[in-house]
């Protein structure tokens, strides 16, 4: 990773100081704000202000932002808004986190460097950034144990299919029901997915018991999924976490079997109970197959993890078994149907039934194959997470007072080789972070008349990040308070620098591009 640690130094290639034409020194504390020179030919307070960044002063800044189409749009929008309202005032500043201003004036004297190019996240001067929305994925049904449960749109298609197929079977077993058989079939479809929900709740309860956050439960095409945000810490917990789902499905099958005993088999309750018993047995057996992303694959992963001592080794083994399983389902299921091994005859195995079986096998194989690939990618993600360290990704920052002009603040940053500005009070305590998008929108000729603090975002508690954070802990902190830059502080409270969310993302992409470590 092309970063350097130390004292919050910027990454190599970013910290060559370059002399720009420094603006006037900051006005003395307590002195009135300087006004525009009477004969400079510029009138910033009128609509004659340029609609974009000054082509000389912000060439490199625009070049960096130009690597991201959204960033360029933001810079133009900021400049246009700035030209419309004249000099920005504190009341006009958004209450949102701004982009990390990595380029500042130092980068304006450099050629654009691919490792410094900022991926702007779309922050504008006007509207606040969007807060992270609650995970969606369909119709919200409830929040058992505080975890949202969603029904995906694909579920309604499957429910309709189950209603139609089961209704045809009821017509042969209970022909006297007539059209009412479809109501019974719909009830069966809902009850079946209620059983699937119980299966997923077993995973959820186990995860919460182990202190693992669960993002949501989603009922979807061919079952459901519990989205657990963290990995189990030990192979034993991983095994238990995977096994409880099929175990609950087996228990439900046993409950339906016991309830079926006193009931007449050739009745609506008897048919429903028998169908639910068989379907839960199928769910349990299918999930116990030893390949990711199925529960059996996670159990296999836990066993290999325990033997090898490496979670990644277990993931690779279980994922490749899952892919082999997908191929087996794709080829084997139609063959079993045609051979009569599943209770069909040769006459039943032709025509539309053959096409339906082949389509079902293809869908199941695709789900398993895709899930196995996703499991491999997620394992690589977690393997590289420790490489993300706040200390090594932090940019050097220069503290400036609230009454420091923007041109003077940029001059100080250039002289120090810094890539960020932190506004402090008279005692040196940080107050806010100057936003890069706002700097880009201020033409060079106006910078002596604009205070740096007017372009800053006030700091909140969530925007203060410890320099010791790394890996998943760092990402958890950034997710808890979405912003585009954060103040990094030492344990003593001393300012260490500024962390850009774009730098974290870029470092993560570079880490993910490298091949995983070999198994030992």
Image: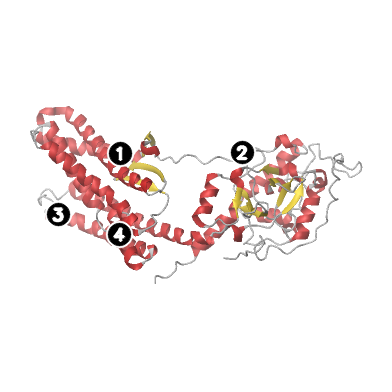
**How many neighbours does mark 2 have within 10 angstroms: few (below 14), some (14-19), or many (20 or more)?**
some
* Cα gap from disc 1 to disc 2, whole angstroms: 39 Å
Mark nearer the N terminus (4 vs 3): 4
Camera-side mark, 3 or 1: 1
How many dots with numbers?
A: 4
| Residue shown at 81% from the left, 40% from the top | 44
- Which residue matches tag 4? 322
Camera-side mark, 3 or 2: 2
Res. 157 mark: 1
Mark nearer the N terminus (4 vs 1): 1
Check the picture and name the quadrant holding the N terminus: bottom right
- Which residue matches tag 2? 128
**How many neighbours does mark 1 have within 10 angstroms: few (below 14), some (14-19), or many (20 or more)?**
few
Q: Is residue 258 above or below residue 20?
A: above
Asked whether disc 3 touches disc 1, contact meaning CB atoms under 8 Å apart, the reply is no
- Which residue matches tag 3? 338
* Cα gap from disc 4 to disc 1, whole angstroms: 26 Å
Asked whether disc 4 touches disc 1, contact meaning CB atoms under 8 Å apart, the reply is no
Q: Picture coordinates of residue 62 (x, y %)?
A: 69, 53
Mark nearer the N terminus (3 vs 1): 1
Q: Assign a secondary structure to mark 2.
A: loop
Q: Assign a secondary structure to mark 3.
A: helix
């Amino acid at each position: 990773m092309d970063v350097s640690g130390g004292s919050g130094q910027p990454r190599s290639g970013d910290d060559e100081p370059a002399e720009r034409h420094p603006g006037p020194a900051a006005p003395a504390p307590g002195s009135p704000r300087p006004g525009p020179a009477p004969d400079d030919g510029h009138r910033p307070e009128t609509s004659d202000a340029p609609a974009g960044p000054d082509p000389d002063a912000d060439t490199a800044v625009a070049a960096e932002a130009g690597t991201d189409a959204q960033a360029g749009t933001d810079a133009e929008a900021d400049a246009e808004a700035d030209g419309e309202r004249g000099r920005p005032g504190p009341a006009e500043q958004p209450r949102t986190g701004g982009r990390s201003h990595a380029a500042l004036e130092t980068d304006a004297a450099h050629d654009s460097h691919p490792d410094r190019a900022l991926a702007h996240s779309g922050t504008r001067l006007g509207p606040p950034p969007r807060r992270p929305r609650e995970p969606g994925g369909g119709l919200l049904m409830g929040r058992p144990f505080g975890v949202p449960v969603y029904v995906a749109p694909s579920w309604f298609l499957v429910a309709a299919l189950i209603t139609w197929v089961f209704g045809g079977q009821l017509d042969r077993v209970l022909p006297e029901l007539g059209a009412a058989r479809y109501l019974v079939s719909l009830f069966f479809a809902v009850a079946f997915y209620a059983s699937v929900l119980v299966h997923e709740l077993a995973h959820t309860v186990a995860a919460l018991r182990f202190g693992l956050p669960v993002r949501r439960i989603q009922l979807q095409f061919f079952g459901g999924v519990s989205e657990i945000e963290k990995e189990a810490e030990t192979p034993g917990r991983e095994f238990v976490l995977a096994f409880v789902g099929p175990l609950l499905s087996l228990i439900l099958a046993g409950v339906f079997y016991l309830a079926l005993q006193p009931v007449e088999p050739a009745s609506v309750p008897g048919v429903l109970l028998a169908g639910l018993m068989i379907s839960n047995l199928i769910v349990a057996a299918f999930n116990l197959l030893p390949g990711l992303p199925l529960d059996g694959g996670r159990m296999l992963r836990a066993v290999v993890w325990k033997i090898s001592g490496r979670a990644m080794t277990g993931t690779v083994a279980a994922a490749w078994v899952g892919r082999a399983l997908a191929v087996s389902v794709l080829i084997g299921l139609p063959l079993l149907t045609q051979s009569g091994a599943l209770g069909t005859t040769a006459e039943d195995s032709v025509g539309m039934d053959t096409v339906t079986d082949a389509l079902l096998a293809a869908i199941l194989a695709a789900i398993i194959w895709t899930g196995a690939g996703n499991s491999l990618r997620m394992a690589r993600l977690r393997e590289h997470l420790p490489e993300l360290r706040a200390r090594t990704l932090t940019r050097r920052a220069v503290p400036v007072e609230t009454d420091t002009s923007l041109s003077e603040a940029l001059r100080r940053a250039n002289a120090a080789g810094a890539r960020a500005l932190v506004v402090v009070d008279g005692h040196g305590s940080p107050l806010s972070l100057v936003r890069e998008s706002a700097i880009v929108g201020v033409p060079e000729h106006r910078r002596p008349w604009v205070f740096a603090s007017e372009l800053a975002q006030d700091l909140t508690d969530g925007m203060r990040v410890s320099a010791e954070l790394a890996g998943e802990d760092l990402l958890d902190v950034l997710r808890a308070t979405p912003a585009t830059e954060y103040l990094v502080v030492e344990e003593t409270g001393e300012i260490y620098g500024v962390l850009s969310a774009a730098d974290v993302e870029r470092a993560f992409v570079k880490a993910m591009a490298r091949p995983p470590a070999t198994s030992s």
